[in-house]
């Protein structure tokens, strides 16, 4: 009996941040389902976090199931500030390129699916003979906006350090969201003018390097982003919304998921729970944290609030423990949630969110209305999608001090949950999102196109 042919091997390379690792791990599971072996690359720092989260929780690490986890240094010391995205980005090429090239050669890898933010791997196209598919962990609209950076500099809207010279509303297409220049995604990421300059220069350099890639893969679907997809420089595949595997296989979480929230949700009335989660990088100070806590109580509804270990600046565990005791019976506070399962739960009424793209797509897929509370990066543009184009959510507004008050939270929760039009539009988008990934529909067809491309030598 003839031996079966070897499974094609693909390297997957995410930027070292939670949302990037998670979505590319979800794609990796889809590729394994289609017969691939995946070599999944993390930084040493994040690799250790993922292994620790897997051991602490009930999810299995996918090694041995078609996904091999490997890691390389990120160029930062043990105490480096990995929330300074500009500084982190600056050191990654020198720290990783050598190891990546050696691995590509030794494992005979022909394809790399690389996060757009890791597009320095395109340097290996001529030297290692590898082919690259770029993966966008943000919207196609953000990708199009990246390409517009040189024009914005030329027009005097921003300078080469990301400082805004003329605050204009940027609107690339009537079917795409608009954004003020002061809220452009990359300028809030660098913590110094030098790291912001590094990011801007990287964007300018990559806008030409992108053409070395074979395709751009987006976690989106054509019904909501056809105009933005049409602006991308090379053929784009829209394969979203991506979804976590149905099994207990880990999806690259840095913290263990607390599944005690699921039986708690079972005990709540349908459409009653306010779900609150701000992703992996948002940080609140003590005053904003207290206003949010008091606002959730004032709203008078059961709530599930995710407070990850590094969410609150200058607030100890004692405050959180006291709040848990105060709201016992009406609210549940956990460290990290199985978010897609939470959003799919019939008891969830709305999602108070930072509007990261993964959370945006997950809420959209499950038909959940949003209260939008963006923190930085692409989240303001995603808010514009939700509130201005799709009309499936409301903005949360800060006062003159920049603080969202408890009264604002109470009022917006009541207004959102009383708006039947928002609920109807959210359910309509849910139907469109689910239809797109069904067999034979647009996202499913684009996934098969990607699979066939990755099988080419």
Image (cartoon, rainbow, N blue to C red):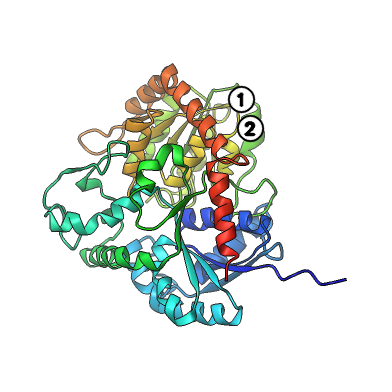
Q: Residue at x 71, y 71 (%)?
A: 6
Rendering coords of residue 380 (x, y %): 31, 42
Q: In the visual, does 134 lie left or right of 435?
A: left
The residue nearer to you, when weighing 281 against 404, is 281
Q: Within 10 angstroms of label 1, few (less than 14), some, or many (20 or more) residues?
A: some
**Which element carries disc 1, helix, strand or loop?**
loop
**What's the residue at 51%, 30% (across, down)?**
367
* Residue 453 point in image, percent of width and height: 55, 61
The quarter of the picture where the N terminus appears is bottom right
Q: Are marks 2 and 1 in contact (CB under 8 Å)?
A: yes
SS for callout 2: helix
Residue 189: image location, x then y, percent: 31, 57
**Apparent side of residue 252 relative to residue 291 in the rendered image (left or right):** right
Q: Residue at x 60, y 21 (%)?
A: 269
Q: Is residue 389 left or right of residue 453?
A: left
* Nearest to the observer: residue 386 or residue 222: 222
**Residue 257 visible (yes or no):** yes
The answer for how far apart the CA atoms under marks 2 and 1 are is 7 Å
- Give the vertical position of 420 relative to 114 (above or below): above
In this view, the residue farthest toward the right is 1
- Residue 444 falls in which quadrant of the image? top right
Residue 275 location (% of width, % of height): 50, 33
Q: Where residue 264 is drawn, which disc sits there?
A: 2
Tell me if I can see residue 304 in this picture.
no
Which of the 4 image quadrants contains residue 47?
bottom right
How dense is the environment of label 2, judged by Cα within 10 Å: few (below 14), some, or many (20 and up)? some
Q: Which mark is residue 340?
A: none
Image quadrant for the C terminus? bottom right
Which residue is under mark 1? 268
Examine the rendered structure and indicate whether residue 424 appears above or below residue 345. above
């Amino acid at each position: 009996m003839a031996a079966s042919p070897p499974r094609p091997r693909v390297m997957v390379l995410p930027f070292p941040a939670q949302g990037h690792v998670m979505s590319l791990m979800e794609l990796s599971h889809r590729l394994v389902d289609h017969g691939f072996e995946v070599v999944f690359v993390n930084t040493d720092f994040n690799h250790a976090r993922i292994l620790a989260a897997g051991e602490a929780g009930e999810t299995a690490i996918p090694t041995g199931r078609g996904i091999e986890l490997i890691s390389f240094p990120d160029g930062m010391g043990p105490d480096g500030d990995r929330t300074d995205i500009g500084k982190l980005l600056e050191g990654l090429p020198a720290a990783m390129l050598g190891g990546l090239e050696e691995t590509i050669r030794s494992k005979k890898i022909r394809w790399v699916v690389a996060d757009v933010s890791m597009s320095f791997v395109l340097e290996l196209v001529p030297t290692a003979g590898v082919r690259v598919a770029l993966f966008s962990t943000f919207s196609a609209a953000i990708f199009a906006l990246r390409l517009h950076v040189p024009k914005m500099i030329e027009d005097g809207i921003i300078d080469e350090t990301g400082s805004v010279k003329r605050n204009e509303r940027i609107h690339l297409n009537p079917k795409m969201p608009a954004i003020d220049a002061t809220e452009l995604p990359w300028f809030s990421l660098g913590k110094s003018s030098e790291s912001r300059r590094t990011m801007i220069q990287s964007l300018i350099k990559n806008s030409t390097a992108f053409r070395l890639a074979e395709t751009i893969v987006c976690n989106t679907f054509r019904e909501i982003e056809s105009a933005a997809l049409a602006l991308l420089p090379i053929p784009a595949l829209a394969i979203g919304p991506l979804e976590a595997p149905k099994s207990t296989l880990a999806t690259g979480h840095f913290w263990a998921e607390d599944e005690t929230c699921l039986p708690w949700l079972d005990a709540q009335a349908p459409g009653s729970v306010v779900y609150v989660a701000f992703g992996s990088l948002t940080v609140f100070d003590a005053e904003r944290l207290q206003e949010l806590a008091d606002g959730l109580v004032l709203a008078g509804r059961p709530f599930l609030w995710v407070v990850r270990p590094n969410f609150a600046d200058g607030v100890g565990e004692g405050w959180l423990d006291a709040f848990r005791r105060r709201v016992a019976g009406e609210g549940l506070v956990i460290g990290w949630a199985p978010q897609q399962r939470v959003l799919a739960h019939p008891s969830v009424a709305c999602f108070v969110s930072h509007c990261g793209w993964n959370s945006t797509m997950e809420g959209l897929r499950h038909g959940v209305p949003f209260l939008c509370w963006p923190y930085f990066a692409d989240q303001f543009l995603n808010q514009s999608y939700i509130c201005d184009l799709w009309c499936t959510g409301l903005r949360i507004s800060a006062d003159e001090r920049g603080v969202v008050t408890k009264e604002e939270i109470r009022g917006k929760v009541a207004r959102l949950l009383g708006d039947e039009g928002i609920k109807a539009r959210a359910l309509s988008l849910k139907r469109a999102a689910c239809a797109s990934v069904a067999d034979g529909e647009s996202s499913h067809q684009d996934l098969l196109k990607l699979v066939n491309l990755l099988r080419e030598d």
